[in-house]
C-alpha cells in the first residue's frame, strides 16, 4: 500500500500519494500558473544522469538574494536527491520562478555560506524550518557550529537571475 500524506518524510524516496503530491506543483508550472507561488517555489528542469531523460522538480526557495539576484535552494535529502545529483552531473539547465523561465548559472554554495543562509531562513520561517528538519530526520543543537555541521549534509545551490533583470525584485 502507498504511503499516506500524514506519514510523509524526506528520509527516503517518495512513493504513492506523497510522490503525487510532490509532482502537483510541476503541473501548475507547466500550465503557466507558476505565478501562484510568487517567488517561494522554483522549478528546475534537469537531465537524468543515467536515463538522460528530461525531469522537472519544484523546490522551495530558501532565499532570493536581493543583492546578487540569486535564488538559493537546498537539497534537503542530505545531498542525495536525484535533482541535486543530476545538477552535479549536468548543471546547465533551465529554471522557472513564477512564469519567468531562463537558463541560469548554477553555483554550489560552500557550507559556511549555506549555514548563514539557512540561519536567515530559520529566522524568517521558524515553524516551517523546524517541521522540515524533523521530516528529514535532522536536528542540531541550535548553535552556528551545529548548523554548519548539518549544512555539510544539506547542500545548497544558487541560481543566477534571469538575463536582463535587475538583481533586486
Image (spheres, rainbow, N blue to C red):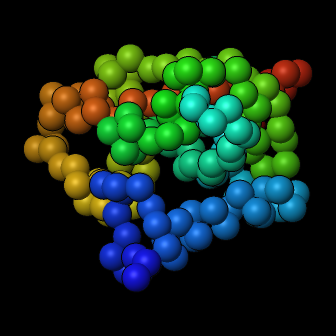
Residue drawn 70% across and 38% down?
53
Query: From the viewer's perspective, is 80 left or right of 103?
Result: left
User: Residue 101 is drawn in which quadrant?
Assistant: top right
User: Residue 28 is drawn in which quadrant?
Assistant: bottom right
Residue drawn 39% across and 44% down?
76
Residue drawn 71% across and 57% down?
26
Query: From the viewer's perspective, is 136 left or right of 63?
Result: left
Query: From the viewer's perspective, is 17 left or right of 34?
Result: left
Give the percent coordinates (x, y) of residue 37: 70, 59
> Residue at the left extreme?
141
Residue drawn 41% across and 55% down?
13
Query: From the viewer's perspective, is 59 left or right of 77?
Result: right
Q: In the picture shown, does residue 90 fall above or below 45?
A: above
Q: In the picture shown, does residue 5 fall above or below 84?
A: below
Q: In the picture shown, does residue 42 fall above or below 159?
A: below
Give the percent coordinates (x, y) of residue 132: 35, 58
**Considering depth in this image, is 10 or 70 the residue closer to the camera?**
10
User: Residue 134 is drawn in which quadrant?
Assistant: bottom left
Q: In the picture shown, does residue 134 fall above or below 104?
A: below
The reply to whether residue 67 is in sight is no
The reply to whether residue 49 is in sight is yes
Quarter in which the N terminus is drawn: bottom left
Amino acid at each position: 500500500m502507498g504511503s499516506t500524506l500524514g506519514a510523509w518524510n524526506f528520509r527516503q524516496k517518495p512513493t504513492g500519494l506523497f510522490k503525487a503530491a510532490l509532482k502537483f506543483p510541476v503541473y501548475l508550472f507547466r500550465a503557466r500558473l507558476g505565478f501562484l507561488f510568487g517567488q517561494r517555489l522554483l522549478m528546475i528542469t534537469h537531465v537524468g544522469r543515467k536515463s538522460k531523460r528530461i525531469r522537472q522538480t519544484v523546490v522551495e526557495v530558501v532565499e532570493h538574494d536581493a543583492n546578487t539576484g540569486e535564488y538559493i535552494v537546498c537539497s534537503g535529502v542530505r545531498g542525495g536527491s536525484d535533482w541535486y545529483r543530476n545538477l552535479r552531473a549536468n548543471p546547465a539547465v533551465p529554471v522557472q520562478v513564477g512564469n519567468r523561465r531562463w537558463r541560469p548559472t548554477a553555483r554550489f554554495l560552500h557550507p559556511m555560506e549555506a549555514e548563514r543562509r539557512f540561519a536567515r531562513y530559520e529566522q524568517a520561517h521558524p515553524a516551517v524550518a523546524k517541521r522540515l528538519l524533523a521530516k528529514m530526520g535532522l536536528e542540531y543543537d541550535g548553535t552556528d557550529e551545529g548548523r554548519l555541521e548539518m549544512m555539510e549534509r544539506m547542500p545548497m545551490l544558487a541560481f543566477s537571475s534571469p538575463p536582463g533583470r535587475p538583481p533586486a525584485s
